[in-house]
Amino acid sequence: MTDPVEERRDIQVLLHRILDAIVRYRRTVVVMVVFALLQVLFTKLPFLLVEPLISVLGEAAGATAGVPDAAGGGAFESLRAWFATGFRDFADELAEVLGLHFDQAGMNVVVACGVVTAFCGICGAAVIYVVQTVSRFFAYRVVADLRCELARHFLALPLRFFGKRRMGEMISKVTNDTQVMQRSFEMAADNVVVDPLMVIGNMVIILMVIPEAIVVMLVMLPLMVIPMYRQGKKVQKRSTSSLQAMGETTESLNQILTGIRTVKAFQLEEARYRDFEATTQRFLDRTRRVLRAKGRSIAQSFIGYQMATAIILVLLGYYVLSDSGVTFAAVSGIIAPLATNYQHVKRVTRAYNVLRESAGALSGIEDILRTEADTAAVGGAPIDAVKGDVELRDVHFAYDDKPVLHGLSLRVTAGETVALVGESGGGKSTTLDLLLRFHDPASGAVLVDGRDLRDIRLADYRRHTAVVSQQPFLFNATLRENIACGRPGASQAEIEQAARAANIHDFICSQPDGYDTMAGERGANLSGGQMQRITIARAILRNPAILFLDEATSALDTESEEVVQQALHALMQGRTSFVIAHRLSTIVDADRIVVLEDGRIVESGSHDELIANDGSYRRMFDKQMRPDAG
């Protein structure tokens, strides 16, 4: 059950967002408000023409003149009398200007009504165009800002954040939740501005005829507002639940698409579809509850509105029949405002519900935005170069409450190649993450060139590092752009030189589009070996002082591995290199091999030294080599 305090907080956050957008784009908002007022003017002005039109038609039929008497009346009656008299004078002047002369009495007023209505239609269309265009663009602009803020915050979050969140859920926040926010801002920019002004315009017209109607409206207003407020709270709560279900659906689809090879290979189509169908049904069930709350809000507000309208209609009949000075022509003039009021009230009610729904959507987004950004990226002393001396000094590290490294100490000189080996979960990848400063040690220190990594500006340090991972990642861009990620701004000659060193240049040139060949989604247009050599070219172009190889050849076949190993050998020359390798045969030439077990170093030395020691490394090596030996 949603905490009422959280609900109020979410509404406050949403209102703060809207206010912030209004302040940031105040010129746009001023244009919106000015043109909204003009839209009200051109929309409601024709309603005021009904009374003079009906009056002259009544005069032609022999009825009493319908011009209201301002004597002894209040401000609204005086305004109505002034408009009626003034419009007749305007009609006569307009006929004179147009050179029109009619035999029928009152035709000047009839023509003037037609001309003014046509003028309001033309001007109103132009104004509506501006209001719709500006308000919708305002909504898109605000939501685009929110998406950019969310994307920037994602990039600033520490790596551990992404290990605790589902990818589909985060994508849903950027797409589905912000789409709800966009609807909110569209309605806030449209209905919340224009329709209340329309209601006020209608009220002015009604009050010009029956000032007492204001009492009826004030009494009936709570009957419209209270249901709106009560159901709006339910909309907000249920919208949050519905959007969570949408995130689950997006995650389920993400699992299908990203794991499609596994799904097909293990014949999981039906199982994955049932999971997707179940999450979709959960989304539909929760959405139905949202729609019911919205429907009740509109229906209950409609009751309040209709009650007020019924009383006003009785008042109209009473005033006309009691000879109080309210004419049939005046009554005719306020029927249209009464009839259109409901549409405006309904749109305001719907806008309020969407605002509450958006508060629920914003809640999930704000949870992410409130997550503390990676402090490692801020501060630190600038550095121009990295020599490559690295030391881990009594390093302890844990994921939440699960210890991984226990007092790890290791010193590596510049240009040395160190291989980290051991069983899964021993701490190899965690050690690389600490060296890259994806995490900071709980205690102890990681030093580079004798300086604590936490005291160095992270951007400067990472500029001198490069990573080649077990599963290479390529962007859906050209091969040139993927290689150039290593050093943005590199020349074509430098890119080709790196590609040659990675043994991938000839393959690229054999493609019809050469370096402009698209890699495809996640490198789908390339083989595993080709993708890996592209990432190696990327690392070579970066020219790092410290290189990290995380099982860079474990997923390759023998032929591809041989070519990639040649490229890696060229890449490692003269650089401090940390290598995690599954195949021990690929690291026999390493300067030092470090064996990790349960987050501790149990052995360290060259391949020959460790074989001679007849310890853990020897057992692992023999286990891998036994099939060849047999």
Image (cartoon, helix red, strand yellow):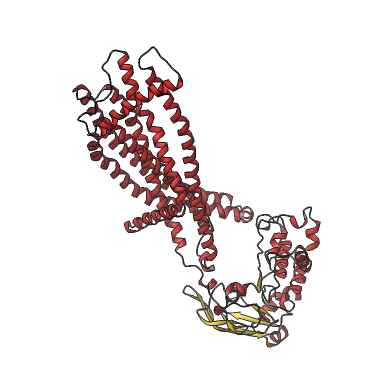
Look at the picture and state if 266 lies above or below 577.
above
The C terminus: image quadrant: bottom right
| Residue sitting at x 31%, y 47% | 229
Question: Does residue 394 appear to the left or right of 112 in the view shown?
Answer: right
Q: Is residue 380 visible?
A: yes
Q: Nearer the viewer, residue 570 or 289?
A: 570
Q: Please, is residue 143 above or below residue 500 in the view?
A: above
Residue 2 appears in view? no
Q: In the figure, 443 relative to 248: above or below? A: below
Residue 555 placement (x, y as % from top left) = 69, 65
Q: Position of residue 445 (x, y in %)?
A: 55, 82
Q: Percent x, y for residue 91?
A: 38, 23
Residue at figure coordinates x 68%, y 69% from the top left = 552
**Where residue 293 appears, x then y in whole percent?**
36, 44
Q: Nearer the viewer, residue 378 or 252?
A: 378
Q: Residue furthest left?
A: 322
Give the number of callouts. Answer: 0
Relative to 50, does residue 397 appear above or below in the rendering? below
Q: Which quadrant, please, contains the N terminus? A: bottom left
